[in-house]
Amino acid sequence: MSGSMSSIGVVAIGRNEGERLIRCLNSLIAQLPQGTPIVYVDSGSTDGSVAAAEALGVQVVGLDLSIPFTMARGRNAGFRDLIEKFPDLDYVQFIDGDCELLQGWITQAVSFLESNPQLAIVTGRRLERYPDASIYNLLADLEWNTAVGEATECGGDILTRVKAIREVDGFNESLIAGEEPDMCVRLRQKGWKIWRIDVNMTLHDAAMTKFSQWWKRSVRGGWAAAAGAKMHGHLPEKFRVREFRSGWLWGVIVPILAIALAPFTKGLSLLLLLGYPYQMFRIYQYRRNRGDNPAAARIYSFFCVLSKFPQAIGQGKYWLQRWQGKQATLIEYKASSPQVSG
């Protein structure tokens, strides 16, 4: 192994991912140098995931289930375990258990980090495994396709510099969503940078086939927007403030005003509802300029506007939980994968 490739560890997290987890771990074993430390953090799976991971020779870290689980907590636990056992690691690849690492990613990502010492994180293109299986999977695939270059945030699949993650004490374990963008804000405050390179990184299996799944995922997004605006909205960049205000405006204020004022305006207030098709048109134009075909751009624009309603619910959940002083619990949208075959 080259010096750089021997200084990498991997943290995978999951719960009841079943065969998706097996694909994930096999892709890591196949593409990383022999002996690369891989830690799988399990959050109470009942589908045989732990035994399957151990059978592949992967180190398993189980979480104390008496403490509310968050993905941030899982990633931190894996990171700490790696660094404790392998203190000389320079880089850690984080990957979700429903993702498969793609050929060539690690080599190019490591090279980019080594050539740019100011970078804390490098990420690439996450692709949806079955984008044609449902419009909800397609929406996820379109969402993953963000701009190449310097970024303000990232998702869960990332190659990170150990020094940088240590400097900000990792992920915020109180967050049930949006923990990666939150960490990126804190990294950027320390002078670190995040970069997306034009390389296919992972295959993701969203497994969203129902409207109810998409709705829950959007509620979770609203929760994350509210949390992000509360924690970092005071910064000059006004982190998540625009998304937060948009959720309340289009998810609550506009429909209530349009309907409530209709009797007093002889129905003229209903013209406010024309703002929805106008927003769809704007988003459609944006996605077309990004290279989406017309059908994909129409689907994306429609659901982007529709998502304002579940996002507003998610924002309301965040503030209600905060007012009540309760720890938030995960908003899960994905069905468990079939049991791991023996």
Image (cartoon, helix red, strand yellow):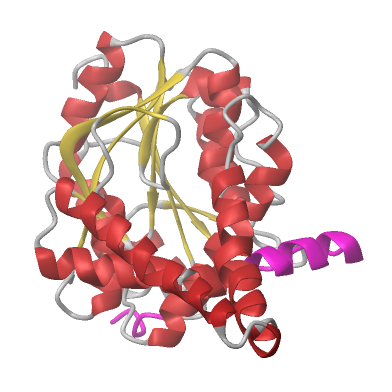
Specify whether residue 297 is in view: yes
Give coordinates of residue 155: x percent, y percent. 41, 46
Q: In the image, what residue occupies the spot 52% across and 20% down?
A: 164
Q: Residue at x 24, y 77 (%)?
A: 135
Q: Nearer the viewer, residue 189 or 47?
A: 189
Q: Quadrant of residue 96?
A: bottom left
Give the farthest residue toward the right.
324
Residue 322 picture quarter: bottom right
The residue at 85%/64% (across/down) is: 326
Q: Is residue 28 above or below residue 118?
A: below
Q: Which residues, given as a range, are shown in magenta?
A: 314-342
> What quarter of the picture does the C terminus occupy?
bottom left
The quadrant holding residue 90 is top left
Out of 51 and 321, give the one closest to the viewer: 321
Q: Where is residue 138 drawn, in percent x and y? A: 23, 69
Q: Is residue 235 magenta?
A: no
Left or right: 257 in relation to 139: right
Q: Main secondary structure of the magenta part?
A: loop
Q: Is residue 334 magenta?
A: yes
Q: In the figure, 323 relative to 33: above or below?
A: below
Asked whether, in this view, residue 302 is left or right of residue 289, the answer is: right
- With respect to residue 119, does 297 lie above or below? below
Q: Is residue 219 visible?
A: no
Q: Farthest residue toward the front?
A: 266
Asked whether 22 or 256 is in front, the reply is 256
In the image, is 79 to the left or to the right of 137? right
Residue at the (25%, 10%) spot, across then down: 115
